[in-house]
Image (tube, rainbow, N blue to C red):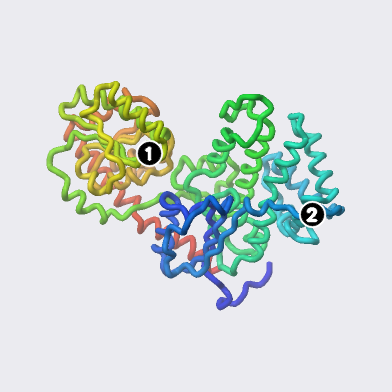
Amino acid sequence: MKPQPEATEYKADIALLLEGTYPFIRGGVSSWVHQIITGLPEYTFALIFLGGERGHYGEQQYVLPDNVTHLECHYLMDANTEGHPTPRKGNAKAFDAQRSLHEQFKSGTPVPPEIMHQVFSDLGRPEGISKEDFLYSMQSWDMIDDSYRKYCTEPSFVDYFWSVRIMHAPLFQLAEVARNMPKVRMLHSISTGYAGLLGTLASEQRGIPYALSEHGIYTKERKIDLSQAQWIHDPTDQVSGTLNEQVGYIRQLWIRFFEALGRLTYQKADPIVALYQGNRLRQLQDGAPEAPTRIIPNGIDPGRFVAVRKSRPQAIPKVLGLVGRVVPIKDIKTFIRAMRTVCSEVEGAEGWIVGPEDEDETYVQECKELVNSLGLQDKVKFLGFQNVNDILPKLGLMVLTSISEALPLVILEAHAAGLPCLATDVGACRELLEGASPEDRALGASGAVVPIADPEATAREAIRLLSDPELWHQAQASGMARVEAFYTLDSMFDAYRDIYKQGVKH
């Protein structure tokens, strides 16, 4: 390991490796990144942003805090321009190491450290495998041809050849970014994928600590995207959109590529952080070693909701609220169907759908037509985007009918505002409503969990909570206690402060 530079040469304490998020995209993971930076002012940060095509990103959406000392941006899809081909032999030893790496990927076993070190040392170097060697050398041609003959189950060599070239081209740019990024004490990637590989490369090259945090599971999300991607041409005329054996070889090749990037990241990173137990188990399933995995949930500032709680009326409002975008993944239609039963059983009940309607206009129209067809025009209201603090005191129950979630902040905010919740059994919702540990579960349920796409169960639980004031107030107290005990910003900051403290003292 090379000796570390003097402290005065460090550009920042931590390099945050960000793929397609902060500071150019608002909300979600970007909001979390901004929280971490502003919440830990004692550390300095260098931001390394990775994007696809430059034209897909607009103006910077965040004013960078004073403890951000560096920002650099790299657009991986802009790096695929090729020069004039020139014949070259290629480094046989370096390509042999690449073959060994790919065989390890196929076996699903961890890559031996010596192979990882050799491959990452060779990548992008003239004495190893330069980009030109990868594009034009006989060694590269032989490797691609050999893999095609051994493994490809589809007839088109042209599709296979160009797929391999396209998926590997950004790796040479990442190797260059890793070598030239500013000197920092540790690395922190906010996903696997290309950002995760950049962290793996830089950690291997520099011998510095590397932490990984995953909000969603990148590999799972890429599988879903790739199973439906129209730019990948399957041998049949129809793509099922599923991940079964009918998915074509080229599509599976891309999926395996991102699975391999994830395993490399898991092998190098320590700690490996998930938001909740379900995602931690998915990380283990995808190849993460158990020892470095840990859970750090997102948090909120409960103090921000004190005034909201005080403005809540004494009587329980008969209003069910769904706060979220009007898009299919939120399954607004199940909420609407459930409201038909609720309104027939609970006098004066209403359903409010609170969130932007500009993302999927067709789906919005379908939802409004469903309201009309069920005769709920006076009962179910579309309020559009609102300040959530103005809405929360007016609700008697927060409802999430989503078919997919991670750790929804809207549940934490509702609990902090003294509002029980009803949610589908996705992501961390069960943990948020029933508890994640024995100590947490001892607080009691702060609402109810129901199956996905089940309007009858949703209505039944909503009626039960709204019709029993004692049960409702128990759920209210449990939710407020749960947020205060396990989901505060301070607890999240303390957890990451510990990670950074260990890393920067290296």
Q: Amino acid at mark 1?
A: Cys
In terms of depth relative to the viewer, which is nearer, 361 or 212? 361
Residue at the image point whose x is 47% and y is 67% from the top: 68
Q: Earlier in the sequence, mark 1 or mark 2?
A: 2
Label 2 packing within 10 angstroms: few (<14), some (14-19), many (20+): few
Residue 458 lies in quadrant: top left
Q: Residue 359, relative to residue 214: is it above or below? A: above
Q: Amino acid at mark 2?
A: His
Quarter of the image with the C terminus is bottom right
10 Å crowding of disc 1: few (<14), some (14-19), many (20+): many
Label 1 to label 2: alpha-carbon separation: 54 Å
Q: Position of residue 505 (x, y in %)?
A: 53, 69
Q: Position of residue 171 (x, y in %)?
A: 67, 53
Rendering coords of residue 313 (x, y %): 14, 43
- Element type at mark 1: helix
Q: Residue at x 49, y 54 (%)?
A: 58
**Mark 2, residue position:** 84
Residue lying at 86% horizontally and 54% vertically, measured from the top left: 88
* Residue 155 horizontal/vertical position (percent): 76, 29
Which residue in the structure is indicated by mark 1?
429
